Image: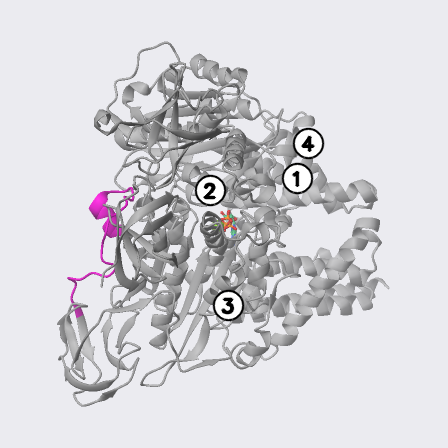
Amino acid sequence: MVVRGRVYRVSGPLVIAENMRGSKVYEVVEVGPERLIGEIIGVEGDKAIIQVYEDTTGLRVGDNVVGTGYPLAAELGPGLIGSIYDGIQRPLPILEELVGFFIKKGVKAAPLPRDKKWHFIPLVRKGDKIEPNDYIGYVQETETVKHYIMAPPNVHGVIEDIVPEGDYTITDPIARIDGKELVMLQKWPVRKPRPYKEKLEPTEPLITGQRVIDFFFPLAKGGKAAIPGGFGTGKTVTLQQLTKWSHVDIAIYVGCGERGNEMADALHSFRKLVDPRTGKPLVERSVFIANTSNMPVAARETSIFLGATIGEYFRDMGYHILMVADSTSRWAEAMREISGRLEELPGEEGYPAYLGSRLASFYERSGHVVTLGKPERRGSLTIIGAVSPPGADFSEPVTQSTLRIVRALYALDVNLAYRRHYPAINWLTSYSLYVDNVTSWWHKNIDPEWRSLREKALAILQKEAELEELVRLVGAEALPEEDKLVLEVARMIREDFLQQNAFHEIDTYCPPRKASMMMRAILLFYDLGLEAIQRGVTVEKIREMKSRARIARMKEIPNKGFEPYFEELYKFIRDEYSKLIEEVHVYA
Amino acid sequence: MPSPSLAIRESPGLYKAQGSLIIAEPMKGVSYGEVVEVLLGTGDTRLGQVIDVGKDAVVIQVFGGVSEVDMHYSRIRYRGEALKLPVGIDMLGRIFDGLGRPIDGGPPIVPEDYQDINGSPLNPASRLPPSEFIETGISAIDGLNSLVRGQKLPIFSGSGLPHNRIAAQIVRQARVRGKEEKFAIVFAAIGVSYDDAMFFIENFKRYGALENTVAFINTADSPVIERIAVPRVALTAAEYLAWNHDMHVLAILTDMTNYCEALRELSAAREEVPSRRGYPGYMYTDLATIYERAGRVAGKKGSVTQMPILTMPDDDITHPIPDLTGYITEGQLVLSRQLWLKGIYPPFDILMSLSRLMKDGIGEGKTREDHRGVFMQLYSAYAEGVKLRELAVVVGTEALSPRDKKYLEFADRFEKEFIGQGEYERRTIEETLDLGWELLAILPEDELKHVKEEHIKKYHPKYRKKKS
Ligand SMILES: Nc1ncnc2c1ncn2[C@@H]1O[C@H](COP(=O)(O)OP(=O)(O)OP(=O)(O)O)[C@@H](O)[C@H]1O
Ligand SMILES: [Mg+2]
């Protein structure tokens, strides 16, 4: 039965409707003559509290409010790849065709194209027994993405009919299971996590091509991480780098309450840039959700859940997915605004008391799982959220609640950003709890000594921080030679290893093997330096070595076939030190 | 064109007037966000807007305050639509008040259209990434914080700093090289002193820019609440000229701090739960609906570039006004009191300043191939110099190594010669970059890690002199 009520009050994105008995929380309603999309977030007697996902200007008391009987759901199926949606999955390019380059309210368009035919190849036969999430067939959606058509999570039975290979739209029946027609299009409520068989501890790193992350604070496939930082410290650039270069099958970029120009930039660069692993444009493995800061506030919240739902859907096919959300703070602010209008009891800084649990309900959708369905497969959804603390002060509620949830933290530091040390990830305060998880993978696949190299480098940086206090009092020249060398090498680690320019044609991505060889060069320079000091060489001499300049240029070495270069570099460093030591002894 | 008269209705009853709010008797058909006229007993009228509408009451926010609203004699006239600005090409060369009414003694404009001052969000998928370099002739901007068409780049200033002079210099000098295109300036004075507003107008006049300018003036003595409307009114004009008349518009909004103060006042009047330092929790979103009205779109010739100016209370960049602005704009140009006291004009704090869209606007074919490297090298060298300068204060210059001393020298000269320049001096981008190389030549060559070796060979004074 369809509920029909009337507007009782309008206050910003919040509408109270009366005469709504029978409606349920989370039900989608259409409000007013323009049929604005809203969602019921509370019911009290015959009144429903509705958050409206479009601009409410022009609504009147007494306007119609019509229930749909359904919760807010994402459309899932072929056509997702390369799309760009707003927070309620309206396809933005189609909206442009319909109403021009300003978004108008009340415009409706199907998220997935209805008339497009996809070449469907069945994978099951008549008589096969089907369980939820079983592969039914697939569509080669882009050259890089094989889009599996799966039985929806609530469907099981026997295949009574299956269409032959051929071209079908997403609403054409492709199979019949126990009398029920199956189409390629699925719908899934965005607030409800999709089921899986088992959640596993992540074991494989998510290689991102960003040295400070891969080498120092590794991310894991299925992990959850946060990037907090003041304005202009590099959250967006870092997230874009991760979506561009991470070793994943599909990347989902959610711009939530951020800039329009940034979205435009992401869209354009994803069309231009080529995925080095497949040779195809990045857009062919990406999905965009854009609810910019000037678009209706309430839809920020749904944009994040929409992203997670699309991520889980592809995860269920057995893929590795990365979803980034920029910025979760804007989402939390939207929640605060709605909560304020509801006159709920405000918690810290006006945020509702459920801030923490709502944040958790989002990050918890990450994971490395054994999916439901045949054939048995594993998939992962990794989630990374940007946090924008006011005044770059991490003690504020959104940052703090996030820290309790995530397992890797990339803390962006305004002082590093002012010094143009990019990515401005502070190496002393950032951490990853995935180091142990991924150690054996690194040792087996990249470098058998990764752990010790990593720890040694971090120790040098730690030591530098301690020495800096001292330097501030007495100046660097008053330090013992060993400590001067630490300062010299720490600077190398910072400038020649950690700094990585996102806009450099080569250094934008760094293969893990190259990262490790770079670190080996620096640590070799350090170890031999210590030895040389013991044999009477001064740091002043070490500072003049040519090796330094060569180490500084390591980043620019092309990402393929770099091994001989490094072998040669190691030899160069050794030879130069030998000469230094010889000189000292000749004089002596 | 709308025919508003059909929709106009009057409500008799007022329940309460307080601060800038009126609570009125409910009336059928009142819509959320619509504009009202408050007819005062004195015969005057005030504009207002419906900010909450319910079966029990209508809440109206009044531009101009409610001090003279008499509960018995005042009436509310509902206009049936949101606040609209009459727009047209003959706005150019004219001066208006904060609500778009002419104040230059001229006739009303001939409107080509009426547009909602709140605008509509640009579809992010329709935007083109800004990438056309605007040469302002100021080294600190062009070389290190390049501005591109469609960007929103604010100036973060402090009271007493020369932000107005800098903005005027930018307006005088800004150009896109090699192109003759229609351009316009939209200027919004938000709660600034009469002198400051006139400084701009005089400047526009003197340099023949007035005929390409549309000015909206809300001075310090105009109604506070009108300040909420000024930037929106101005950007409506800017968008109209850009999207309907193919013009490249530079919108200057000054001072956004006054806007935010007005917003805070309003929020307090509504008895909302305040967020940081009394500013409303939705200030980020509210500011975004202003600052996001900039950009370029596919298939349109025009563009809107924004340069908001704000004064940081107590020079504190973490104050909510600069903080939230920085979270929305595409960078910021920060002024430094320290440099100003040293006598350096324009006193840009290079380390705190940033232009995020610079990367797409510079380099080969746009400025020069070595631009990116030079800019990164100048930044990092200056940062190093500043750090060492602080250190030298503690340990004395003697304790520094010869290398460090070079950096000190670099930092000093960089401030004087590169950042510093005349108020009427226009430097081409080539002059700016060459000047950069000259200063970098102070440093040992192997310190120049950020510039490509081939560029060192081509542009470093040492090699250039050899060649010529
Ligand atoms: N890895 C990087 N390489 C080169 N430049 C970088 C890098 N990271 C950040 N930057 C520079 O810093 C600027 C700001 O970065 P970004 O836009 O990501 O900041 P943000 O933290 O997202 O800020 P906001 O919170 O305001 O959105 C970029 O425009 C770029 O100039
Ligand atoms: Mg950002």
Residue behind mark 4: B338
Amino acid type, residue under disc 3 in the picture: Lys
Q: Decide whether residue B13 is among the magenta residues.
A: no
CA–CA distance between discs 3 and 4?
A: 43 Å
In the rendered structure, which amino acid carries the disc numbered 2? Met
What secondary structure is marked by label 4? helix
User: Above or below — where is B228 with respect to B208?
Assistant: below
Mark 2 residue element: helix
Q: How far apart are labels 4 and 1 at the CA level?
A: 24 Å
**In the image, is residue A95 part of the stretch drawn in magenta?**
yes
Tell me whether marks 3 and 4 sit on the same chain.
Answer: no
Q: Quadrant of residue B34?
A: top left
Marking on residue A335: none
- Give the quadrant of the N terminus of chain B: top left
Label 4: how many Cα within 10 Å (few below 14, some 14–19, many 20+): few
Q: Are marks 2 and 3 in contact (CB under 8 Å)?
A: no
Is tag 4's residue or tag 1's residue first in the polypeptide sequence?
A: 4
Q: Chain of mark 4?
A: B
Determine if residue B427 is in view: yes
The location of residue A474, given as percent across then percent down, is 84, 50
Residues flagged by tags 4 and 2 on a common chain? yes
Q: Which quadrant holds residue A142?
A: bottom left
Query: Which mark lies nearer to you, 4 or 1?
Result: 4
- Give the residues in magenta: A93-118
The residue singled out by tag 1 in the image is: B442
According to the picture, the residue beneath numbered tag 2 turns out to be B358
Asked if ligand 1 lies within 8 A of label 2, the reply is yes
